[in-house]
Amino acid sequence: MKAAFLSNRKGRLAFGSAMLFLLVAGALSYRGIVLAGEGSRWVQHTHEVLENLQDLLFAMESVESNVRGFVVTGEESYLESYRASTLSAERYQATVRNLTVDSPDQQRRLSALERLAAQKIQFAETVSDLRRVKGPDAAADAIRSGSGTRSMDQFQAVVRQVKDEELRLLAQRSADAKRRLGQTEAVLVLGTVLGLVITAAAGWNVRRDGSRRGRAEEALGESEERYRMLLDGVQDSAIFMIDPRGRIVSWNAGAERIKGYTADEILGRNFSCFFPPEDVERGRPEEVLRMTAASGWHEEHAMRVRKDGSRFLARVTFRALLDAAGNLQGFSEFSHDLSESKESGAKYRGLLEAAPDAMVVVDEGGEIVLLNLQAEKQFGYHRDELVGQPVKNIIPEGFAERLIADARRSTAHAPAEQMGTGRELIGRRRDGSEFPIEIMLSPLESAEGVLVTAAIRDITARRELEQELRHAQRMEGVGQLAGGIAHDFNNLLTVIGGRAQLGLARLSASDPLRHDLDIIHRTAERAALLTRQLLAFSRKQVLQLRVVDLNERVRSSADLLERIIGEHIELIFVSASDTGSVRIDPGQLEQVIVNLAVNARDAMPDGGRITIETAGVELDADYAARRIDVVLGAYAVLSVTDTGVGMSRETQARIFEPFFTTKGPGKGTGLGLATVYGIVKQSGGHIRVYSEVGVGTSFKVYLPCTDEPVEREPSRSAAELPRGTETILLVEDEAEVRGVAHEILERLGYTVLEASVPADAMLIVQRHVGIIDLLLTDVIMPRTSGRVLAETITTERPETKVLFMSGYTDDAIVRHGVLEADTHFIEKPFTAPTLATKVREVLDRPH
């Protein structure tokens, strides 16, 4: 009985042990099934993450492309597409964040990705606002500044990091699942063997566990098959593994299609067979693996070679594969054929359409294969008329012959390098007209061979701007010379005119010398008028600015113009109600009107018609972009148009130069239009001329409008020369000018203290015990300027008033030719009445 008990006890122990091992084996078998299913789920999870990341990248690229399209065309449809792409990007970001919620590292990367996306969208909004407010050039400048491109590059880099991390996690998770499944299998086998040894009663449990193990292995095989199918299902990318020595150990269907090798042909070979021979010779394959091993990953755009020897441009990403201990196990390579990818093609076409310049893609034979909307507009063709046609149809010379050949030779070494940058050629429109262009080339190898992308810019406006700038620089140089001459000449005229007036005052009415002195005086006045014209041209005259109504000023000049023009010419005035007010010297404005009208009269010796017209305009960014020194805003326009002989282009290029006249020898000084040019420029405006030989000429003067109220001129009444008894300190380095001014002032009753240089003037101030009522000083003198002298004296004697005089002014007295509000100034050459009136005016003004 004891034996039976022991037997039963052993049986129970065996049965219990068998049941225990059965339970353990069952649990492990179930764990194997779960692990096999887990591997399959991770494959599907990774596929979803990668798919949503790719969609997110496409959405952000669409954001950039649509904004560029709006910048170029101004069409609101681009903004609608832009907003749709923005919403799509937000949706894909949310999906990826939910899928990677269990990975803190991925969540941090996604936070960076969302921040970069927000920056990119904010930049796109800024560019769109610039396009609406300031026009395409300002928006294009913002795009070219590079901040938008940098944020997109950073965005793409973070996307790559998320993708790479997800693939790394997939490999790690698959390896973990395999390892745990292997452990499960080992324990399962051990349990089965022990169960058979311990008791035959547990055999049926072992057999059942074996069945479970088979199912687990089948599930794992299915998981591995799905992973292989996932890789083989990627047809547009070559994906394969490389061992640490560079030998290929795996191969997907995309690699077979792109590279041209089957798995049997390529497995075990070194991956250097995909590099061009010149890259292999310089050790590029080994260098790539070294860089990847050092940094963990490496990406490049480079040429690769297929089995048949053909080359293609690829985007290649390498990733180092490490075990749990951090030891290098090999590398993964992802290659994407840029020359044939639908994604790349769509993106490339989108970039072409968004480009601000005309873009034309040409093959090796010189035929056009692709062009954008800007090219259609620039050359006047529909794209269907140009595709397949020789590029010579639109660029007759120079393009197909140093430039395509240069681009083709460069592709082997620098496929993305721009060639022919800044090359200037001639373009031909559909109507046969030709225009200057600047061309930049970028070569690209495709499955069909070398393609050349040409960015073509119409530089007609730039050429005109360059010509206008050269003309302005030449005029500025001549103006500087003319201003200097006028300054020196004014000192001489002050002496000549002043002495003539003083002489006339001493002679009786019957004195025979009176006639000669009168001629000298009138001649000096005529010469003074000439110097004022030179100062006007050189923009160094003093303008007494007031706000005036342009229409009112034109109307007030009508009587004068009718007397000057003559009856053989019809004079027409046309005024717009919205012309507006301008800030200008009224006398100078009248001179502009008279000079233009007289110039028009002289262009019609046999009679004709002069139309003087006013209007208000708003100058926009397009107008300003084609002009030098033009500020956007509202302008009043004065137009003087004649029906005269007109002018050639050569004549128009020189009409504002001083002493250049179209009237022939002995007919005119050549200063009329030069004076107009100087007055208009000094008043903040600009002038344009439009003329055709035999048709007529139109001058348009643009003056900036102001909202300030119109200022009325003070009334003047004729009177005796004003006199006084005050003390005046006269400082002038020109002895003759000083002598004339001294005598005029003494005759008017003033006490005059005289100094030739500022140092002497300071000594006089220090020694003079009485009040010095007025300092009359030249502006430009040796060592110390009149401004510095005046500031020094008025610091010591605040009661002393100051009157400046000069042949022309400088920045110490004048700001852009306009007197400061508290500055008193008299221009040389001055007459006795002018000096008397100005001195009295300054003395009578309160401090």
Image (cartoon, rainbow, N blue to C red):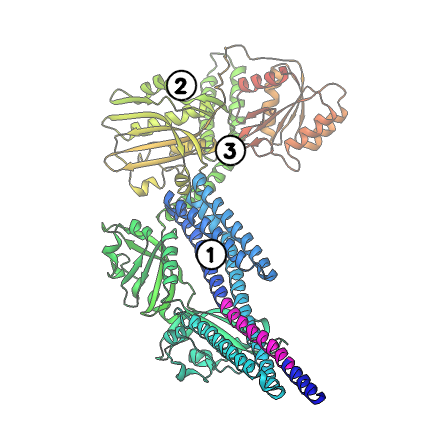
Amino acid type for the residue under numbered disc 2:
Glu
Is any part of residue 466 visible from this angle? no
Residue 423 picture location, percent across and down: 38, 59
Residue 523 versus residue 197 in the image, above or below: above
- Mark seen at residue 430: none
Residue 751 versus residue 7 in the image, above or below: above
Name the residue carrying label 2: 552
Name the residue carrying label 3: 540
Which of these two is toward me, 59 or 315? Answer: 59
Residue 136 versus residue 51 in the image, above or below: above
Q: Earlier in the sequence, mark 1 or mark 3?
A: 1
Name the residue carrying label 1: 56
Residue 316 picture location, percent across and down: 46, 70
Amino acid type for the residue under numbered disc 1:
Leu
Q: Provide the residue span drawn in magenta.
A: 16-42
Which of these two is toward me, 406 or 742? Answer: 406
Q: CA distance from mark 3 to mark 2?
A: 27 Å
Quarter assignment of residue 252: bottom left
Q: Earlier in the sequence, mark 1 or mark 2?
A: 1
Q: Identify the residue at horizontal 39%, vertical 61% (top origin).
A: 343
Magenta segment main secondary structure: helix
Residue 30 lies in the magenta stretch: yes
